[in-house]
Image: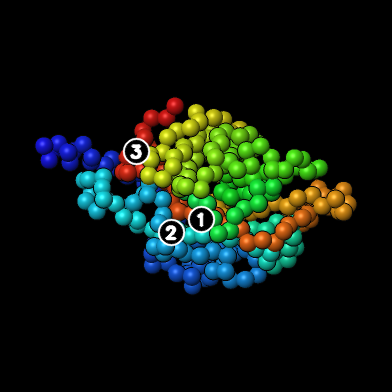
Amino acid sequence: MLLSLLLLFSTAAATPVIYDGRAPFSLTASDLDASHDPYLTIVKGTEAASHYSTLLGHSVPSTPLWNKRVFPLLPFPTVPSEQSISVNIDNSSIFSPGGSNPQFGFRRTDIIAQQNGNHTALVPLMENGVTVFHFSIKLDEAHPLNYNHEYQIVFIEPNDGSHVFGIQLGSPFTNPTGMLPAPQAHSFKVLDHALNVLFTAPFTSDAWHNFAVRVDWNNLTLAAFYSKDGSPLKQVTKVVPNLSTAAGAAGQGDFHFGVLKLPLVNPADSASDQADVVHHGIQEGTTEGLIYSGVFVESEKTGVSIGGGRVLKKLD
């Protein structure tokens, strides 16, 4: 009987992890300030990185989806193997690329995937063949978002500034400003490169929201997966074309997660300034944030990891 139980709960072979952004408990605020692996932390305001991003230790347990089993052949009990990280913005969160041309329209704190101190060399490793981008997001109840604004929170950004895929919250930026908050402002929206909405899920306060986005870099397709807390990821879209993204190196870019808040149109601005969303617009300057865990990228050579040591080998 015991042997049967052990076999019933045995885990599938893990898929190859290309980038592991699950913050170990040994990672410190000093590591964030110094942009030590696994994070590049330069996309922020003028304060130190640890002003905007906080490692939460054991105070906010990470998503249970990737917990370690105390007994490898049994599904329980489990314990966290990573710490969560909160990512915040405030009125100082104005990024100046290269130290110039500050982005006054945005408030942003982005964490960028890097490995061996190099984010550029990681890109072709993560974005080759078929790879899967995992991340989990939780509400920061102490620093709520303003859903009248658009937030771009997870994306891959090629050099042209587009996004191979993106996760959006809030009310999409429009000029002129439409009804606020927009319908589904409080829902996650998974977007393709052409900004089509592939999947939505309400951003409830009672759970970790787990996502995976499968990218086929050769055939230019996407597929999305979603679950809450420790429930296994489920495929929530079919494999869909993503043909507007460029093929090859032109369609590759850094993997970002964090909080990028777009402005509202300022009626006092000129027409040209109103169209320049990066440098102009209305921001309230409040402290806002999200909590992340479960960030990693895997190859799909043996399937898609769906949690609890399980792997989905066949996609719809």
Residue type (three-letter) at the residue carrying disc 3: Val
Identify which residue, 196 or 19, lies in the foreground.
196
Classify mark 2: helix, strand or loop.
Answer: loop
Who's the residue at 65% across and 48% down the image? Answer: 147
Identify which residue, 205 or 68, lies in the foreground.
205
User: Tag 2 or tag 3, which sits nearer the N-term?
Assistant: 2
Who's the residue at 53% across and 55% down the image? Answer: 140
Kindly identify which residue carries mark 2: 60
Residue type (three-letter) at the residue carrying disc 1: Ile
Q: CA distance from mark 1 to mark 3?
A: 26 Å
Residue type (three-letter) at the residue carrying disc 2: Val
Percent x, y for residue 113? 51, 56
Kindly identify which residue carries mark 1: 291
Residue 162 seen in this snapshot = no
Who's the residue at 54% across and 55% down the image? Answer: 141
Give residue 202's quadrant in the image: top right
User: Tag 2 or tag 1, which sits nearer the N-term?
Assistant: 2
